[in-house]
Image: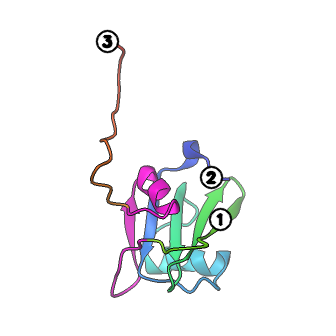
Amino acid sequence: MIHNRTIDKVYLARGTTDLRKSIDGLAAIVQEGFDLDPFSPCLFVFCNRKRDKLKILQWEHNGFWLHYRRLEKGRFPWPDADQLEAMAITERQLRWLLDGLSIEQRHAPPEVSAEKVI
């Protein structure tokens, strides 16, 4: 399961990915294609060509999680790219994306980071 306390960053694989790849293939893309560590406490998100399916690769303790999401209607608003490259997004943007919304929500209130009670 995706636990917020264990996530440092979220990376999108811009463009499309062949989702026939499983854990080893996606981890190889992260390591060799993005020059990132697939064993880091990050989420790596991949989308298919039709933009109706996502896979999320996550390392936790002693093994990988592979999360899969399929939209029954509509498409994920996925960022284009001429080649596969990683794009860092926030966990909030990931939640929007998983709901089928754009990662650029212009009318969303800004996040507030409170440090003390007044």
Q: Which element carries disc 1, helix, strand or loop?
A: strand
The relative height of residue 59 versus residue 16 in the rendered view (above or below) is above
The relative height of residue 33 versus residue 37 in the rendered view (above or below) is below
88 lies left or right of 64: left
Q: Which element carries disc 2, helix, strand or loop?
A: loop
Amino acid type at circle 2 is Ile
Residue 75 lies in the magenta-colored region: no
Residue at image point 47% right, 71% down: 76
Amino acid type at circle 1 is His
**Which residues, given as a range, are shown in magenta?**
77-102
User: Of callouts 3 and 1, which one flags the residue occurring earlier in the amino acid sequence?
Assistant: 1
Residue at image point 55% right, 45% down: 4
The answer to the question of whether label 2 and label 3 lie on touching residues, with beta carbons closer than 8 A, is: no
The relative height of residue 25 versus residue 65 in the rendered view (above or below) is below
Give the distance between the C-alpha atoms of the residues marked 2 and 3, in whole angstroms: 33 Å
Q: Position of residue 117 (x, y in %)?
A: 36, 14
Farthest residue toward the top? 118
Q: Position of residue 116 (x, y in %)?
A: 35, 18
Amino acid type at circle 3 is Ile
Question: Where does label 2 land, which residue?
Answer: 2
Question: Where does label 1 land, which residue?
Answer: 67
Residue at image point 46% right, 62% down: 97
Give the distance between the C-alpha atoms of the residues marked 1 and 2, in whole angstroms: 9 Å
Q: Position of residue 39 (x, y in %)?
A: 58, 62
Question: Where does label 3 land, which residue?
Answer: 118
The answer to the question of whether label 3 and label 1 lie on touching residues, with beta carbons closer than 8 A, is: no
The relative height of residue 91 versus residue 19 in the rendered view (above or below) is above
Q: Quadrant of residue 26?
A: bottom right
